[in-house]
Amino acid sequence: MSLKDKLISGSTIKYTAGIADSKVYGKKELVTTRVPIINAALSGTLDGGLAPGLTMLAGPSKHFKTGFSLLLAEAFLNKYKDGIVLFYDSEFGTPENYFEQFKVDIDRVVHTPIMNVEELKFDIMKQLDQITVKDNVLIIIDSIGNLASKKEVDDAMDGKSVADMSRAKQMKSLFRMVTPHLNMKNIPMVVVNHTYKEIGLFPKDIVSGGTGGYYSSDTIWILGRQQDKDGKAIQGYHFIINVEKSRYVKEKSKIPVSVSWESGINKWSGFLELALEHGSVVKTKPGWYAATGSEKALREKQIISNDEFWQDLLSCTTLAKFIQEKYQIGGKGDQETIIDPEDIE
């Protein structure tokens, strides 16, 4: 027996193995969503997606954080026919019809209301203990931003107005305990969080909850938004995914996602801007665009949600390669095109 084999067999840790055989370092399955630019924001490629580990969606109120989490839930349940979503709810702002709008099968969602951080910590650890690597489970916490600690609640009940110094410790304890389970059992967990502005001349958004969630996260998005107006009427929002932290995507990347009241998330969000930057689409005159080399020009409204146009462009240009090189850490793409458009239909 070699020294390496002796050390592996002598270990008291169940998952000890050589790097090549490690279940932790092995290739992770990604959950691909129906919105290619979301996949790029998660993994750097249009046909990538959500990986096991902790993904945090942070931003002010009404910034579509729950919407993004349900989009991921929809993709997860579509990929795994035996999959279950474990939904921890502290804000109770997600009605049943919201799940239905995202085509999330509510019969495969376990809804757990939570009142404080300790309650969440105790329950999630009990659930993680019984989940095995063979189980397909997605955990969503919506949200930890306003979740009180038990001490804060008890102090209020006792009429005390002292500052609560325990919440950050409990939050760090929570993430410290769940992180090994997520990575060793290939469990994706999506956490909705809030942000606040730091004090200063040029204040930036800070993720709330202390350093525990920040250190444990594989991906952190800080969400911004702009109104999408038709004249004076607001018809939706252009959300900006600011990649604050990622193991896969270049940090500080800004990725646009358009959502309208009428049709929801635009599947081809961001593609017009990216194609113009890449050079595979050109502006022929104000409000009109065409594929490079084509004489057929289309209005912006005809092109931004046009499945056939974008699938054709992906199949005959290096746009996918360009997007991967733009966003993915170390992304180099291949010589022609990254993906078969059918992979993201």
Image (cartoon, helix red, strand yellow):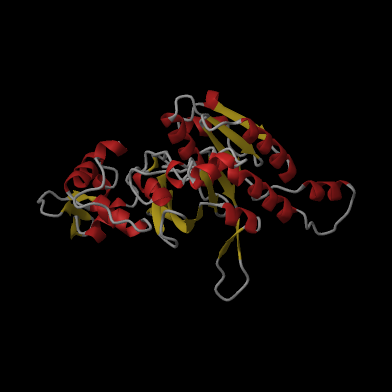
Where is residue 265 drawn, in percent x and y? Answer: 40, 42
In the picture as drawn, the residue positioned furthest to the front comes out as 1
Identity of the residue drawn at 42% across and 30% down: 78
Identity of the residue drawn at 45% across and 47% down: 19
Work out which quarter of the rendered image holds the C terminus and state it: top left
- Left or right side of 225 for 45: left
Identity of the residue drawn at 40% across and 47% down: 38
Identity of the residue drawn at 85% across and 50% down: 155
Where is residue 177 drawn, in percent x and y? Answer: 65, 46
* Residue 110 visible to the viewer: yes
In the picture as drawn, the residue positioned furthest to the bottom comes out as 201
Q: Quadrant of residue 288?
A: bottom left
- Left or right side of 248 for 185: right
Where is residue 290 drawn, in percent x and y? Answer: 17, 52
When the figure is inspected, residue 138 is found, relative to residue 238, above or below; the finding is above
* Residue 189 visible to the viewer: no
- Left or right side of 277 for 267: right
When the figure is inspected, residue 49 is found, relative to residue 201, above or below; the finding is above
Total of numbered circles in the picture? Answer: 0
Camera-nearest residue between 171 and 93: 171
Where is residue 334 drawn, in percent x and y? Answer: 23, 51
- Left or right side of 308 for 106: right
